Image (cartoon, grey):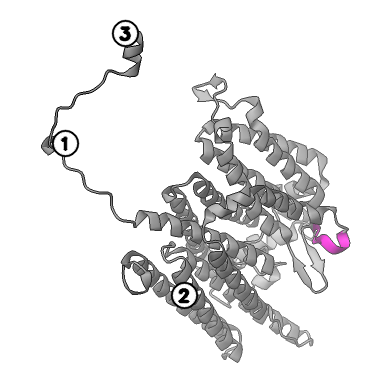
Amino acid sequence: MTGGGISEFARSFRGVELILLVFASVLVTCALVLVEAEQNQHLSPQLLYLGLGYLGLFVGVHFVVRASAPHADPLMLPTVALLNGLGLIMIHRLDLAWDLRAAQSGNPGQSVNALRQLAWTALAAALLAVVLVKVGNHRVLSRYSYLCGVGGLALLLIPGVLPASVSEVNGAKLWLRLGQLSIQPGEFAKILIIVFTASFLVAKRELFQGAGRRVLRMDLPRGRDLGPLVVAWVLSIGVLALERELGASLLIFGVVLMMLYVATSRISWLLIGLVFFGVGCVVAFQAFGHVRDRVHTWLDPSADYNGGGYQVSQALFGLGTGGMGGTGLGAGHPELVPLANADFIFSSIGEELGLFGVSAILVLYLLLVMRGLKTALLCRDPFGTLLASGLSFTVGLQMFIVVGGVTNLIPLTGLTTPFLSYGGSSLLANYVLVGLLLRISDAAYQARSGPPPRARAPLASAATQVVATRRPVWRRIRGA
């Protein structure tokens, strides 16, 4: 141990984290300079506020992590900071483009989405700090599992049962509008549902490990063990029906299915889940008109170019324009895509940074997911393992759904890109997710960095001693 009660192991972790945070801050600030130089041919005072605010914010979070979770993974926070910064760059770039278009049309104005995003980032970082300070041990969350389950279900379904005037935006009933403030409860519901699922699977692990029929060298689960999967399937269909949101349904079902697989290590759960998924797709296509519209747009976006296919078509044009290296920051026209700073921010980045840029961003997401999964492997308690696995897989699956929709690989959904997209609800929820992962990783790495086990002498050189032993109990009973 060193001064301050922090081990050398933890001190090295925090040193690496601080260096990477400074690097991320410098990279984001340089990118902001390039954007303003390309768009305005001069630098505005707002740039100074964004750059310094970004640096100070994450340095402050670093010191909170150093004090409350010194053994936490050193790569998670810098990765999140860089992703958040890249989103801030693109949001600021789109603000400048919209201001220019407004000036050309005779309606001068100033878009402040970037400053608002920085304010949301500050609030999200404060919430992350609260999670680290208040949740001293992730196992405490298992005590409130059923409360989390009920709360997550309520947050998920409330927008669907409320009038469209207070919950519907762009055809999806996902929001709660309270005056000028709008929040998306489903972003927080996914975390609560993951906490409940992890605790439930740990408490009922013997139930799911029971052997059923063996078919093609696979142990199929018993019929009564399919309850959680059926509940997740029904919940996904219910969300699809009430809220007309395809992305949240896919996310909930996929995460629960993967956590079942992690808890049981049985490939049969994945196969049964795919069967449920296929049946759900058929039911949704036949029962819901908005799903059919999404599928038809997916099959041929240009068929309704001026209608439902306009957004996807413009995004594909932008990605094609970007090519391999992109048009350069500030040199493209991503503002032509509706919701370019929110649902379609990935296509905006792809146009100006090209395939190389989006590949680097996907590598950052992959790094975040892999560090979360490594935390799950190092964690010594089943609840922490399942919780870290569920939280990590949520980020990975959400990115697949978002990128698949933007590139027309799968039907378009309404999910936002974690840490990149403009909006407060997504940022707040995802920073809570990262805070929980940091807390779990702190416990996992702290256990790993503890004192090594006492060395034992080799068996060949160990001293031997002859002792008298009693006969085993079963021999005495049988009179052997």
Q: Nearer the viewer, mark 2 or mark 1?
A: 1
Q: In the image, 116: left or right of 263?
A: right
In the rendered structure, which disc, 1 or 3, sits on the residue that comes first in sequence?
1
Task: Name the residue carrying label 3.
Answer: 479
Q: Which label was assigned to residue 63?
A: 2
Percent x, y for residue 252? 66, 47
Q: Which residue is mark 1?
A: 459
Viewer-nearest of labels 2 and 3?
A: 3
**Residue lying farthest top?**
479
Q: Earlier in the sequence, mark 2 or mark 3?
A: 2
Work out whether residue 251 or residue 434 is closer to the camera in this orientation and state it. Answer: 434
Which percent across, then down, holds residue 39? Answer: 60, 84
Q: Amino acid at mark 3?
A: Gly
Query: What amino acid type should be assigned to the residue bearing mark 2?
Result: Phe
Cα–Cα gap, marks 2 and 3: 70 Å
Mark 2 surroundings: few (<14), some (14-19) or many (≥20) residues within 10 A: some
Q: Say which element carries label 2.
A: helix
Magenta stretch in the rendered image: 164-172
Q: Position of residue 227 (x, y in %)?
A: 67, 34
Q: Nearer the viewer, mark 1 or mark 3?
A: 3
Closer to the camera in the image, 10 or 377: 10
Quarter where residue 113 is shown? bottom right
Residue 418 visible from this viewpoint: no
Residue 8 found in image quarter: bottom left
Q: CA distance from mark 1 to mark 3?
A: 34 Å
Which residue is depicted at the point 68% across and 41% down? 232
Give the structural element (helix, strand or loop) at label 3.
loop
Q: Quadrant of the N terminus?
A: bottom left
Evaluate if marks 2 and 1 touch, with contact meaning CB atoms under 8 Å apart.
no
Badge 2 or badge 1: first in the primary sequence: 2
Distance (Cα) linking label 2 and label 1: 48 Å
